[in-house]
Amino acid sequence: MTIVPGSASQALAAALARETGGDLATADYDRFPDGETLAAVPGFDDDRAVIVAATPSNDAYVELLQLQDAVREAGASEVTTVLPYMGYARQDRAFEAGHPVSARAVARAVSTGADRIVLVNPHEDAVADFFEAPVDVVDAAGALADPLPADLDDPLFLSPDAGAVELAETVRDAYGRGDTDYFEKTRHSGTEVTIEPSDADVAERDVVIADDIVATGSTMSEAVAALGDRGASRVFAACVHALLARNARTKLERAGIERVIGSDTLERDVSAVSVAPPVADAL
């Protein structure tokens, strides 16, 4: 088995190679003067390829398709594609008449070059149904508990909305103690969110807000500020996918966050844990 990294997942691919004992390929990434990209895997020589490629951009998707084709061209008979972070996964329905289901469109494209897909904490598990190849969904949320301080004071694990309560419970269970609850969230647009605090008592408690993704930081920063207003001691953000687009990091810092903990599904300075072990188990 040879692990082939996408340009956005080089550290994770290396960790996965160590975890599985597989070989680590060296991929080349280039761009032509007209803007077209080129991703290649010189010297690839294996029957089984595992491509590890987060897709936070359109270019990353094109790069992934090229890597899939490159290993097929080099003779791979089995191609597994690991999507640590799946871009467009939140566009899982047509929002207006005439709009695409973008998650379905990209899933179909990726399926053309893969015998199997591995997804890490997709925003909605239902996106797995869009792929035309077998899909395994990996839950890496439990790993987010590892970097948390051992001395959290009467910890409360909160999700930004009711839909993410199970993720908060997973982090709490991995930590070993604490309560769980959630915020009521009303989304007005892609960047405007209203947070209504839950009934949980947060005064003088350490709070961990657990979510699958922090994108623009609007939801998370609103939650952090609301908790500060209610007397929370320390507030931590634990997310599988730390996208941190635009000025998200600044929003969180201004809101009073103690620390942002993310995984290496998106390789950022806050990537404190690796999803390589649970992905390796899925392989």
Image (cartoon, grey):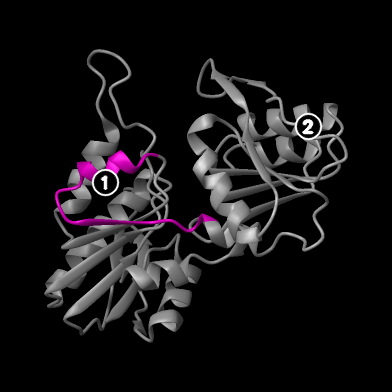
* Residue 199 disc label: none
Residue 198 position in % (x across, y down)? 68, 25
Residue at horizontal 56 percent and vertical 24 percent from the top: 191
Residue 243 shows in the view = no
Near-viewer residue (271 or 205):
205
The answer to whether residue 93 is left or right of residue 250 is left
* Occupied quadrant, residue 197: top right
* Residue 201 disc label: 2
Near-viewer residue (43 or 141):
141
The answer to whether residue 21 is left or right of residue 130 is right
User: Which residue, given by chain and number where applicable, does mark 1 sit on?
Assistant: 128
Residue at horizontal 56 percent and vertical 62 percent from the top: 143
Q: Residues within 10 Å of mark 1 (few under 14, many from 20)?
A: many
Magenta part of the chain: 124-141
Select label 1 or label 2 by which is in front. 2
Q: Amino acid at mark 2?
A: Asp
Q: Amino acid at mark 1?
A: Ala
